[in-house]
Structures are given as C-alpha cells and as structure tokens.
Image (cartoon, rainbow, N blue to C red):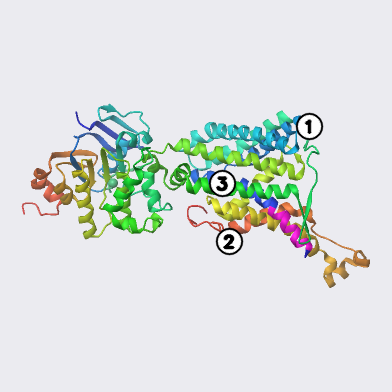
Amino acid sequence: MDIFLQQMVNGLTLGAVYAVVALGYTMVYGIIQLINFAHGEVVMIGAMVAFTVINLLAAGGLPPLAVVLVGTACAIPVCMLVSYTVERLAYRPLRRAPRLAPLITAIGASIILQHLAMLVWSRNVLAFPQIIPLKTFSFLGATVTGVQLAILGICAAIMCGLAGLVYRTRLGRSMRATAQNPQVAGLMGVDINRVIAATFVIGAGLAAVAGVMVGTYYGVAQYTMGSILGLKAFAAAVLGGIGNVPGAMVGGLLLGVVEALGAGYIGDITDLCRYGPLARAVGERCADGGHFVLFGSNYQDVFAFVVLILVLVFRPSGLLGERVGDRA
Amino acid sequence: MSLLEVKGLEVHYGGIRAVKGIDLRVEGGELVCLIGANGAGKSSTLKAICGLVSRSGSVSYAGMDTAGTPVHELPRKGLVMVPEGRGIFPQLTVAENLAMGAYARNDASINEDIGRQYDMFPRLKERRAQTAGTLSGGEQQMLAMGRALMARPKLLLLDEPSMGLAPMLVAKIFEIVRDIARQGVTILLVEQNAKLALEIASRGYVMESGAVTLADEARKLLAEPKVREAYLGEEAGA
Ligand SMILES: Nc1ncnc2c1ncn2[C@@H]1O[C@H](COP(=O)(O)OP(=O)(O)OP(=O)(O)O)[C@@H](O)[C@H]1O
Ligand SMILES: [Mg+2]
C-alpha cells in the first residue's frame, strides 16, 4: 500500500509536468491542426538556458529560490523567441499547404533545434547545482519532497491561469474562435496570424517552466531530453483528446500516474517466481526468495507509448475529445 | 461616390473562371440584391470583395481601393460579411459569439449593443449561455446577423440568409433584413429566393455563370419576363 501512495505522488508530479507540456501541443493543434514536434525541444532549451544561468549564479550566494527564479525568468523569453521564430519561418509559409508539409517541417525543426542545442551546450550533461536543501514531508506513509510540492503547486497555478486565459479573456475567446472557424474569425476582425503566434508563444512559456521543473526534479539537463519528454506529452495530449485544453491536463496527470504505477508494479507482476509452474520451469533462480523479473522499472518509458497506441486504436478522439471524424 | 464599387472583378479557382469580370456598385443606404442560380458565382463575388479568395479587377470601399487590405481590417472600416452557412462558432456560447462580433471595436457600449441584439432576437437572450452549435438553423442565422450587427457595420454583405430555413422563418429573416436596412445599414444581399429578395431591395443584379446579365431597379426586375421565367418559377408567356 505504501508503494501505491508513493507512486501516486511521484506520478502526479511528473504527470503535472506532462500536462503543462501537453497544453502546448494541444493549443497549437487546436488552432492550426499541426502537431508541433519541435515543442519538446523548446522544453529542452528552457531547461538548458535555466541550468546555465543557475550554474552561473549558484556560487553567488543568492538564496536558492531566487537563483531558480532568475534562471526561469531567462528561459521563458528565450523559449518564446525560439518558438515564435519557428512558427514564423517554418510553419506560417505553409499555412495553405497540405497538412503533411508542415508536419514534416515540424520534425525537421525539432532536429535542427536539438542539434543547435548540441552546438551551444555540447553533448555533456548539465547538472543542477546542490543548492536546494532536501526537505521531505511524510504524507500517509508516502514521502513528498519540497521540490515535488513546488512542482505540483506551480503546475496547478499554471493550469488555472491558462484555463482563465482561454475561457475568460478576449485573447482566449479569439483563440477559440480562430480554432473553430479561422475564416470567419478573420471577418470579425481577428488577425489570425497574430493569434496563432500568440498561441505558440504562450505554449513556449509553459514549455520553459516545464523544462526547469523536469530538470530540477531529475537534477540533470541534456540536449536530448526534449525528444522523449515531448513524445510523452504528445501522448498525454492525445490521451486527453488533442485540441482540447482540459483534456491535455487530464491526459498529462493520468499518463504520469499510469507510468509511475506501471514502473512500480511491473517488476512484481512480471516476476516469474510468483507463478508456480513458471517458477518451477525457471528452476533454482527462484529458490530462497529469488526473483526472475522479465521487465523491470526501467521499462517506465514504454507505458506512455502503450497508452498512446491503445488510445489511437480504441478511442482516437481521446478521453475528452468530441470530434472523432476530423481528428482521427 | 458609391460606398462599394466593383469593377471588372474576376475570380479563378485553378482553371475554373467562377466570376468573369463583373461590375457592381452599392450606394450608401441602399439595399441591393444579387440573385442567380446555384453556381452562378454569387458567393465567390462576396468572398472576392472581402479578399477571402484571390481576385483581379478593382474593389473600392468608401472611396478606397481595398487591394492589399487584410481581411481583419475590414470590420474596423465598417465592412462586415455574414458568410454562406452562417459561420457561427459552434463551441462558443451565444454571448461569446456576439462578443466576437464586436472584436474590432474597443468602445464602452459593447454590452449595451449585446442587449440591443437580445431585444431584436429574444430567442438569443434565452439561449445566451448555450453553445451556438446547439441552436436550431433559424436561431443560428439570427445569431449570425446579430453578431454581424455587433460590429456596427456600414456595409453588410449577406450570403443567402434564408438558406435551409422553413418558409415562415424565411419570411421572418427577410423582415429582419429590411429592418436592418431601415436602421441605415447599407446591404448587399445574395439570395436564391429571388422574389422575396427583389421585394425588399431597391436594386438588383442577376448573375448567370459568372457574369452579370441584368441590372436594374428591383421592381423592374420583378416585372422582367426573363427573370419571372428563370427565377420566379413562371412559365414563359404566362
Ligand atoms: N474553392 C473552390 N474551388 C473550386 N471551385 C470553386 C470553389 N468555390 C466555388 N467554386 C466554383 O465556382 C463556381 C461559383 O461558385 P459560388 O459558390 O460562387 O456560386 P454561388 O452562386 O454562390 O452558388 P450557390 O447559390 O449554390 O451558393 C461554382 O462552379 C463552384 O463550383
Ligand atoms: Mg453561394
């Protein structure tokens, strides 16, 4: 039971980050039906910029919180600029092209960004300096770290803020209108290109914060970290129903939990020694409480993709998506 | 000076010439209708006026050539179009749809104007918190009109507002169009329902396969045998 609660806490923490990244995929998809494969790289750039700044400041004796905040504050505008530039140079010229063209361009943009990052930061892993004292809290037998609490709190605030922006402001209204009927939105006076650019920029801001959070959580950042994270967040967006803002939030949290519980239990479940006849077949390795585990917790990354495949096969519109036809 | 002056307008879709060099003008305060059969090029004409499809020829609005004016600048200048099929935002509420109509405005009386639309279309008021996609066809058409009026248009381009509506609603929609015109909004009305359109319009144009074949005062067009035969469903010589 303890491991269940512990994995729930871990899963929700990561899931909250997936959700914030998934929002960037889903908002862009909602408005121009493009899967922005470069989005994961924007997360990576956010982490790299923040880590660079944090490492520079770490020795300066500033309070750790201030160091992380300054790092994030530098990462956000850089990510916004990168994402705006990609939209302007790589996607906007293809607005009227067949859908496959911008999709392939997105994959190209992601490769370019990843390799630019490699040129800037090298292949080396950037480590998060030991500035945040490890604080832990006990919660019904599970351990929660201060960093986890901070991540959960920040993600909750981001999701509330974004929901407020999308559903309560003039910009949000024009974003939704553009997503539903860009031509008519234009006739009403909406500068569609500006709204699309704003969508990319907002998503990039979220990606920057997400990058700092994952980096801080794992303690490392590297130029390759964006691909798998991006794919997982994409899976989360699809799980919730791509194009759907609440869906991305639900999908992210759910994926994080599935992944953590999966990683927590897969070793036990695939331990052949638990199954009588199989244990006998395996023979002496099971003797004296030994184990013969087929899949260990290092298979954690598989769950996101299993979920992605299951959703695509059984419910392509996702959990909260409605329009099956044009999305599948 | 005409409020809208179209000269030699052409629209091509790939190899198809959908509009073949037409001339058209609408004076301030007029209600002008453009009638014609399916595929005559009426919608293409309206889209070309707004710059939604690429065009050649000249379109001047309020004395200014609109070539190069982006679509989203038009409502700021008072030119608003209600597209064929209404073009409501289905997942926005009725109130949000109306607010979108005022997107180009930033004065203080937007809420007052929303109230005015609710007075004109009480059904919309009852359904203001409902998403627009759940409205009936007639209600959606009223929403599309109300939303267009939220922009405080000088010139309103209406593309087949009566399309797909039951006869009673058609009559109601035409009444509304006439009321809007009486409030001083200039209207260019595209319709297949030639009789009703010509009855409320002051002038009319008849389009056939991309060209304007007749242009006259509405009551003269109503009396014109060719029009009666082709668009009012009467036998030749009846
Ligand atoms: N996007 C498009 N691509 C290719 N051809 C088009 C396009 N839009 C319209 N057309 C063609 O141009 C011609 C004129 O179409 P348009 O929609 O302007 O007619 P319309 O007079 O509005 O007809 P209706 O009364 O049926 O609405 C038609 O032959 C149509 O098939
Ligand atoms: Mg038409």
Which of the two marks, 3 or 2, is nearer to us in this view? 3
Give the structural element (helix, strand or loop) at label 3.
helix
Type of amino acid under label 2: Phe
Q: Earlier in the sequence, mark 3 or mark 1?
A: 1
**Disc 3 designates what residue?**
A161
Q: Earlier in the sequence, mark 2 or mark 1?
A: 1
**Disc 1 designates what residue?**
A61
Q: Is residue A3 magenta?
A: yes
Q: Earlier in the sequence, mark 3 or mark 2?
A: 3
Mark 1 is surrounded, within 10 Å at the Cα level, by few (under 14), some (14 to 19) or many (20 or more) other residues, namely few
Residue toward you, A32 or B117: B117
| Magenta stretch, overall SS | helix
The location of residue B53, given as percent across then percent down, is: 35, 37
Residue shown at 60% from the left, 39% from the top: A205
Residue toward you, B39 or B62: B62
Q: Is residue B62 magenta?
A: no
**Disc 2 designates what residue?**
A314
- Is B163 displayed left or right of A192 in the figure? left
Type of amino acid under label 3: Gly
Mark 3 is surrounded, within 10 Å at the Cα level, by few (under 14), some (14 to 19) or many (20 or more) other residues, namely few
The lab-note entry on whether marks 3 and 1 share a chain reads yes
Determine whether B37 is above or below B9 in the image. below
Ligand 1, seen in the image, is in the quarter at top left
- Is B196 displayed left or right of A107 in the figure? left
Q: Mark 1 — on which chain does it sit?
A: A
Give the structural element (helix, strand or loop) at label 2.
helix
Q: Mark 3 — on which chain does it sit?
A: A
The lab-note entry on whether marks 3 and 2 share a chain reads yes
